[in-house]
């Protein structure tokens, strides 16, 4: 049984027997606990289909899906940047499904092989704790570009996640490699890595550590920084030129135990109602044009983005992670 296989790590949202049945679906979730629970509860309320979910980091869940490929223990993967879904599709782990709700979605939010669909837009930026920055660097201006962030004066005052475990940090690494080129990109990353005081595994860690004043600066998703701002933390958001934009995606496992329920869940996640709910909690920018974006979020139209190649990012992943691991010992 799935519930037994996942043990205590699996959160049961509604009581069920744990058997493979049409009124239960199993979800692996990369998005935060609060958003996962809210979305799954609303889905159950609207459809009567119960949800069991496991919330974990991108790396953990991707590895779990690869290990369970021949006997998937989940029906749906919720969240994670497109390159991870591209990689899982290439490994034969994902089912093709085109939701009718994705008809008018932009091309960057839909996969060529119909195995994943984006439901919110993700953009990277720099977060600044105003009080700590003023204390540590009196009179200095906030870094406005990625090059500014690599100023040696910021040593040990920067936090960013670990690209080995976090899709947020891997996207940042690809941002630098794709905007600067392979060699210059690695030179930049080598310089910056020496200034970073901490590499936590979770993408949610830097906004919290910046917000609470443990670090003056950090690399994070702009929506996560916006969320902490809305909660009263005094954070300055910086959207550097030539940043990267991607989408959080949802996909269905190949040989899912409840395929019909999984399709209904994907349809729900892509709906304006679900994306509005997600944005109201997480400050993400919805892909569905009928969904409402929250106040305080920086629109994608106001951000300078590179032409990000998600397929290239996926194909280079093993090589990039190996090089990063050698770089940051």
Image (cartoon, helix red, strand yellow):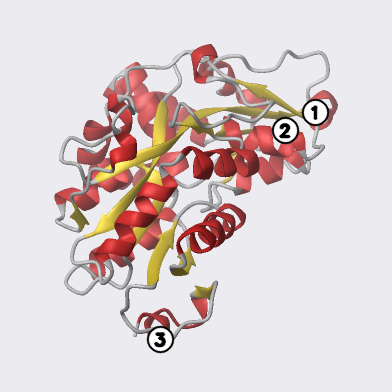
Q: Earlier in the sequence, mark 1 or mark 3?
A: 3
Q: Earlier in the sequence, mark 3 or mark 2?
A: 3
Q: Is 42 on the left-hand or right-hand side of 76?
A: right
**Residues packed near mark 3 inside 10 Å, few (<14), some (14 to 19) or many (20 plus):** few
Q: Earlier in the sequence, mark 2 or mark 1?
A: 1
**Residues packed near mark 2 inside 10 Å, few (<14), some (14 to 19) or many (20 plus):** many
Mark 3 vs mark 2: give the one in front: 3
Q: Are marks 2 and 1 in contact (CB under 8 Å)?
A: yes
Q: Is 107 on the left-hand or right-hand side of 249?
A: left
Q: Is residue 47 above or below residue 182?
A: below
Q: CA distance from mark 3 to mark 2?
A: 43 Å
Q: CA distance from mark 1 to mark 3?
A: 50 Å
Q: CA distance from mark 2 to mark 1?
A: 8 Å
Q: Which residue is more in the foreground, 244 or 54?
A: 54
Q: Secondary structure at mark 2?
A: loop
Q: Are marks 3 and 2 in contact (CB under 8 Å)?
A: no
Tell me the residue that label 2 is attached to: 216
Residue occupying image coordinates x 40% and y 47%: 80
Q: Which residue is more in the foreground, 165 or 113?
A: 113
**Residues packed near mark 1 inside 10 Å, few (<14), some (14 to 19) or many (20 plus):** some
Q: Secondary structure at mark 1?
A: helix
Percent of width and height locating residue 149: 58, 22
- Circle on res. 4: 3
């Amino acid at each position: 049984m799935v519930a037994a296989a996942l043990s205590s790590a699996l959160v049961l949202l509604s009581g069920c027997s744990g058997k493979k049945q049409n009124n239960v679906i199993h979800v692996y979730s990369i998005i935060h606990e609060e958003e996962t629970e809210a979305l799954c509860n609303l889905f159950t309320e609207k459809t009567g289909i119960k949800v069991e979910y496991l919330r974990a980091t991108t790396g953990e869940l991707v590895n779990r899906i690869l290990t369970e490929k021949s006997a998937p223990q989940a029906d749906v993967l919720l969240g994670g940047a497109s390159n991870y879904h591209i990689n899982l599709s290439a490994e034969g782990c994902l089912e093709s499904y085109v939701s009718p709700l994705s008809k008018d979605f932009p091309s960057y939010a839909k996969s060529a092989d119909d195995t994943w669909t984006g439901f919110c837009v993700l953009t990277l930026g720099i977060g600044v704790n105003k009080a700590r920055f003023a204390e540590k660097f009196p009179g200095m201006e906030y870094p406005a570009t990625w090059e500014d962030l690599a100023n040696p004066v910021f040593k040990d005052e920067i936090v960013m996640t670990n690209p080995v475990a976090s899709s947020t940090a891997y996207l940042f690494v690809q941002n630098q490699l794709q905007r600067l080129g392979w060699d210059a990109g690695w030179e930049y990353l080598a310089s910056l890595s020496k200034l970073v005081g901490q590499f936590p595994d979770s993408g949610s860690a830097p906004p919290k550590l910046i917000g609470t004043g443990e670090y003056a600066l950090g690399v994070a998703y702009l929506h996560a920084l916006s969320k902490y701002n809305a909660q009263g933390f005094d954070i300055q958001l910086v959207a550097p030129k030539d940043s990267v934009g991607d989408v959080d995606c949802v996909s269905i496992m190949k040989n899912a135990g409840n395929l019909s329920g999984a399709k209904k869940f994907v349809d729900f996640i892509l709906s304006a109602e679900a994306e509005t709910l997600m944005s109201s909690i997480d400050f993400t920018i919805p892909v569905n044009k009928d969904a409402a974006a929250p106040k305080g979020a920086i629109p994608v139209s106001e951000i300078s983005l590179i032409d990000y190649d998600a397929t290239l990012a996926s194909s280079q992943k093993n090589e990039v992670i190996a090089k990063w691991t050698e770089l940051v010992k």
